[in-house]
Image: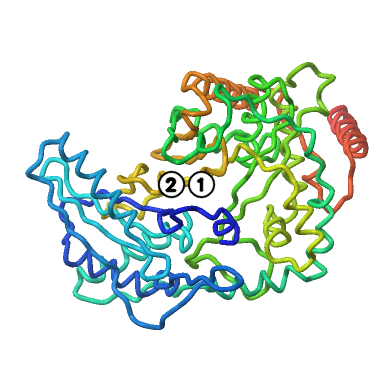
């Protein structure tokens, strides 16, 4: 939230996290509305709004019981083309209608497109109140609520876990703790000043990176490639999917920019295990962390201009494992710390021009025979067109319907579509090379971060691996 208000957007009320559902044909609209209202009242954060003060904006709860504004919009009398136009127009009006200072910061619209195309439910919430994990929680609660109402009952929803407010207070205390002071050197010693900017097709001028000029190019892996990426690749070098996705990103940018280093803004879920007696498994709020990281393949330069996929994957993995607490400390030091010198140092660091976020698997569904199907591209404009984008390139990845999908968002005033198509092509090629390598017989091995308690360096790990190999040979000879 500190990051958001620091942006000083001209229309901060229009920066949403929409969720769009395709409804099953037998959904009862009255029961659905009642279910939505039950879920809305169940999570207190959804009834919050924000008020400006002398020290900035702060969250405010009225204590009053609110209802979420509900709109039913019939469009069945229109042609398919007219429906698309009306959907986009009505949804954009809905998404632009929130007010930060007046709750609730949410709206719901049910669009009836007729018997052939069915119905869509658009649930709009300002991003200040929810993140992607929160949407999954709301969807789970909505299914429980609706099924209870179908039975003529008011179902007891899963109790919300640790509130966002308590989490924020704990982070404020953590900002001045010895625990974070022990990790601050990682961020304070960052040296990124000599990094060149990423290339652009057109010169950057004021207004060239507004939301109105943003376009998204989407690409997907096949189902088989996605299965291999999720199930086969991780066990080879004890990696996570983010390691592979980011390795391919560094390699593809290196081919484009002739620079082996890439400064990225990474996003994480932010629900870190920092405090005892805190449970965020069913907590709604904007917990997301944003933190910069410099990923480099320079250490492998002697292996050639670009190292083989296995070496690159291991190098990126080890750099990511050195980030304390998955990056949450950066935001705490940057926005909640009383040490003005530390804050100034972090503010002076170069800002990444590229962001990356892996949302995880979005195709788990809500059980068998779900009442609604989540659609990945909600109607309407979720962010004000006159707002300045934070990054030149934004890459968002997720698994949908068993396939890895990536959206590359860029500004038409900075890059041609052909440039982004080239970059995306290089990325997919690099990712496929990683998958192929990890499926080969010669791939595999452990790295330093696999033994965090052993305090090994690369040399000691190599010596240990040789001893293990010698022991295996000796055992095989008996």
**Could you tell me how far apart the alpha carbons at marks 2 and 1 are, in whole angstroms?**
8 Å
- The answer to which of 27 and 478 lies nearer the viewer is 27
The location of residue 164, given as percent across then percent down, is 54, 70
The location of residue 77, given as percent across then percent down, is 7, 44
Instruction: Find numbered disc 1 in the image and state the secondary structure of the residue it sits on.
Output: strand
Which quadrant of the rendered structure holds the C terminus?
A: top right
The location of residue 51, given as percent across then percent down, is 48, 72
Up-down relation of residue 132 to residue 233 (above or below): below
Name the side, left or right, on which 367 lies relative to 255: left
Q: Which mark is residue 362?
A: 2
Up-down relation of residue 120 to residue 165 (above or below): above
Mark 1 lies on residue: 359
Instruction: Find numbered disc 2 in the image and state the secondary structure of the residue it sits on.
Output: loop
**Residue at the image position 80 percent from the left and 59 percent from the top:** 342
Residue furthest out toward the front: 206
Name the side, left or right, on which 211 lies relative to 353: left
Q: Nearer the viewer, mark 2 or mark 1?
A: 1
The location of residue 127, given as percent across then percent down, is 46, 57
């Amino acid at each position: 939230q500190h990051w958001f208000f620091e942006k000083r957007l001209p229309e901060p009320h229009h920066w949403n996290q929409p969720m769009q559902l395709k409804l099953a044909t037998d959904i009862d609209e009255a029961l659905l509305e009642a279910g939505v209202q039950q879920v809305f009242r169940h999570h207190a954060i959804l009834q919050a709004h924000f008020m400006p003060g002398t020290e900035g904006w702060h969250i405010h709860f009225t204590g009053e019981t609110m209802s979420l504004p509900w709109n039913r919009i019939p469009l069945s009398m229109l042609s398919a083309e007219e429906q698309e136009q009306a959907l986009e127009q009505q949804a954009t009006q809905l998404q632009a209608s929130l007010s930060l200072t007046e709750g609730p910061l949410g709206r719901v619209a049910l669009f009836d497109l007729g018997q052939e195309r069915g119905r869509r439910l658009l649930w709009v919430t300002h991003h200040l109140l929810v993140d992607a994990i929160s949407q999954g929680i709301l969807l789970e609660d909505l299914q429980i609520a609706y099924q209870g109402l179908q039975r003529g009952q008011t179902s007891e929803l899963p109790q919300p876990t640790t509130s966002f407010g308590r989490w924020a207070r704990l982070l404020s205390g953590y900002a001045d703790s010895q625990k974070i002071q022990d990790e601050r050197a990682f961020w304070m010693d960052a040296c990124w000043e000599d990094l060149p900017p990423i290339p652009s097709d057109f010169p950057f001028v004021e207004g060239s990176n507004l939301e109105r000029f943003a376009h998204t190019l989407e690409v997907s892996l096949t189902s088989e490639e996605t299965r291999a990426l999720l199930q086969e690749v991780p066990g080879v070098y004890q990696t996570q999917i983010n390691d592979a996705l980011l390795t391919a990103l560094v390699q593809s940018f290196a081919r484009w920019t002739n620079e082996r280093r890439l400064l990225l803004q990474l996003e994480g879920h932010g629900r870190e295990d920092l405090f005892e007696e805190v449970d965020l498994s069913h907590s709604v709020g904007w917990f997301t962390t944003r933190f910069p990281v410099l990923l480099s393949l320079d250490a492998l330069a002697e292996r050639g201009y670009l190292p083989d996929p296995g070496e690159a994957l291991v190098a990126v993995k080890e750099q990511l494992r050195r980030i304390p607490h998955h990056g949450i400390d950066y935001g705490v030091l940057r926005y909640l710390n009383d040490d003005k010198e530390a804050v100034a140092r972090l503010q002076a660091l170069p800002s990444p021009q590229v962001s990356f976020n892996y949302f995880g698997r979005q195709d788990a569904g809500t059980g068998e025979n779900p009442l609604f199907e989540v659609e990945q591209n909600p109607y309407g404009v979720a962010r004000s067109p006159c707002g300045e984008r934070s990054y030149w390139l934004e890459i968002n990845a997720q698994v949908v319907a068993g396939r890895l999908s990536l959206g590359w968002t860029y500004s038409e005033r900075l890059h041609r579509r052909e440039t982004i198509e080239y970059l995306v092509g290089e990325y997919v090629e690099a990712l496929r090379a990683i998958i192929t390598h990890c499926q080969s017989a010669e791939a595999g091995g452990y790295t330093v971060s696999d033994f965090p308690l052993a305090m090994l360096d690369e040399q000691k790990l190599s010596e240990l691996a040789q001893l293990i190999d010698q022991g295996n040979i000796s055992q095989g000879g008996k």
